Amino acid sequence: MKPRLAFKVVLAGLAFLALSSRVAIAESPIDCVELGCSAVLPDAKRFETIDDNLFATGFDASDRVVGWAARSTDIVDIKAYSGKPLVTLVGISPKGIISGAKLLEHGEPILLVGIPESKLHDFIAYYVDLHATSRVVVGHSSDPEAIEVDMISGATVTALAQNQTILKTARTVGMATGAVSVAEMSPGKFIVEDRPWTWDEMAQAGTFGRLTVTEEELGIKNSEGILVDLFYTIADAPHIGRGLLGDLTYEHQMKKLEAGEHLFVVFGNGSGSFKGSAFVRGGIFDRVRFAQGLTDLTFRDTDYTNITINADGAPYFKEAAVFVSRGAQIDPGQKYELLFLGSRYTGAYEREFIEFKSSHKLPRSIYRAEKSNLDEPIYVQAWRNRMMDVWLLLGYLALVLGVFIFRRYSTRTLKWLMRIHVALMAVGFVLIGLHMHAQPSVTQVLTLIGTAVGSMDWQLFLVAPLIFILWIFIAVVSLIWGRGVFCGWVCPYGSMTELLNKIAIKLKVPQKELPKRLTYLRYVVLVVLGGVFLWDAALGEVMAEVEPFKSTFLVVPWERNWGFFGWWLFLFAASIFMWRPFCRFLCPLGAALAIFGSFRFSGPRRRNFCSSCKICTKTCEPHAFRKDGTIDPRECFSCMECEAVYRNDDKCPPLITIKKIESNPSPKEHDLVQLKKMKDARKDV
Ligand code: SF4
Ligand code: SF4
């Protein structure tokens, strides 16, 4: 397999994954018969979708509302490890209790083949009967008020994404229906400053959202006029409210507010008016409304007061109004929208309506929201949860790097080098493999790059901190010293098989060897696997079981189906009779790294006379030496034993000869000629 072709196959795979992995957000209204909503709202006898809501309302036998059911992808956009959402049906009662949750669909590779899906179902079951505003923490928390939910071992990111999916869906629906109090869910407070702000201070602090609509945007041809140029904000904070409305009006309006209600101020200029025709009839304002998530705020004439903008230095505004939000709740700490409905006559009695919108978020100088753990990106939670392991891994990798950076010291004797090597392999196997479950795999990189490119969400690279660090390490060290630093020292599976083989040799188990040309097989495995991923990523996940990593570190091998268990057992047994059979002949990750590491800057040290000596070639386990005595970087596992011999004048024959001649007090003439030749040849190649 030529390296270039392999690269092309991998790149084609990434492009395919990029196209195929876009998040599917459902657009159709929720169909409770098809989705089985009663599973998440058991008290409901029938479901109805009211007013084009994205969730369904459940009624009991006497037509009382008993709650709501929603499909998560209609409400929130949260990606899991695969870059796709965990499509979950969530039920919530009028008291804000999560009445049920059911996983409908997912693309998590580890749950497709590996960890049983039942673990995720068990995880979801924790949420039933919790209040939607509960502070749920996946893993351990130092907060005594938090409800701890057990992590799914080996599927941390999936668990974090599932937590956000259920709670955010329940909270958003709860907020829109009034089942959940916004103040309870997103605690925060308006900043209190006694001195009213001037217009300039307000403008500089980002107090206002602004929506400008031209007449041309409304479809009035050849017009350069501005239809409306609107400023808007939430004016509960005294330095804003007093500044805009004046003391008296502000105090009067604030007295009207019930818990959870706010003052919305809109003002502006333009040829049009934001008040609308329905206002004249004494009904609902049909031209402006506010929205946040699923919540829509419309105003009646009783919620409205005409005002003049009073702030010091404010320009003239043609119209200005303050609205009091009634009923539905808005979180002032989150982004909210102003929607303006413009209309124009297209015939004697026909009008065309166009909606324009703009969004705004109050700055922290006006409203300070307390951070909810659900607002934190999943990758931040993942890093915090694994901070201890991150430090342990960094410490371990620093030790491995130290071996290569201070190679003169680490290779000073063969025995010393071998001890360090065995110790680091054992620690890597236990720490990275058994404890952290962080075995790198070729499928991770295909899946991760594909989904991140497809969704342009580079945060996906960060959601698995240990794998992220390992891949950075692999890329850097493979480029400098070749694939052997990772394969020969860090890879938990490779370390396990080498240690197993060392024990077998100590126990005098006879060793076998396969023809070297079979090493090309691993490139075939890489290409076939890449091709299957192109064809069907889910099938690719099954085929990726050629890597026995999941069976070794994630799932108990004998609890898996007999095919996976048999394969794992076969490779395990083969490692007793052969030095790293999987690594040398089959591993697709090893093949990819070998291609990448072909261009390494620095390999084990060699001298000119090494090509004629060849003593190192006999002990090199992966048979990485070519016939001319040079090293094939694709086969070298960087054990550095040849470099330890290279430095040792008791082991390296030419060095022994040099030492012997130099220690002879009366060397012969031809010895001195030979000494000169050998010293000349001693320079590194
Ligand atoms: S060849 Fe594969 S299994 Fe072996 S050490 Fe390298 S990555 Fe690990
Ligand atoms: S002995 Fe072989 S595997 Fe080890 S460093 Fe030398 S060439 Fe590489």
Image (tube, rainbow, N blue to C red):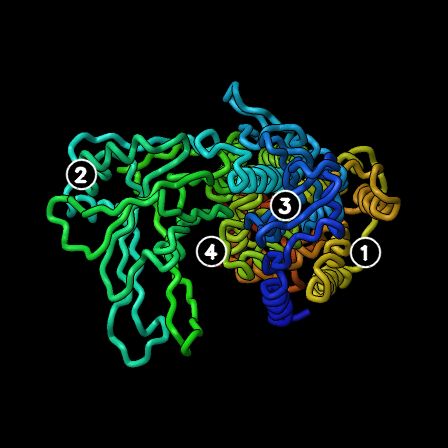
What type is the residue that disc 3 sits on? Answer: Ala
Confirm or deny contact between disc 3 and disc 1 (CB under 8 A). no
Q: Name the residue under label 2.
A: 246
Q: Can residue 259 be seen in the rendering of this structure?
A: yes
In this view, the residue in front, 578 or 105, is 105
Residue 146 rendering spot, x and y as whole percentages: 54, 24
Q: How far apart are marks 3 and 1 (CA)?
A: 58 Å
What type is the residue that disc 1 sits on? Answer: Leu
| Front position among marks 2 and 1 | 2
Name the residue: 81% across, 39% down: 557
Q: Is residue 429 above or below residue 626?
A: above
- In which image quadrant can residue 630 be found? bottom right
| Front position among marks 3 and 4 | 3
Confirm or deny contact between disc 4 and disc 2 (CB under 8 A). no
**Residue 70 disc label:** 3
Q: Which residue lies furthest to the top in this view?
A: 144
In this view, the residue in front, 319 or 156, is 319
Q: Is residue 39 above or below residue 627?
A: above
Mark 3 secondary-structure assignment: strand
Residue 341 rendering spot, x and y as whole percentages: 39, 61
Name the residue: 25% across, 47% down: 306
The yes-or-no answer for disc 4 within 8 Å of ligand 2 is no
**Residue 514 disc label:** 1
**Residue 683 disc label:** 4
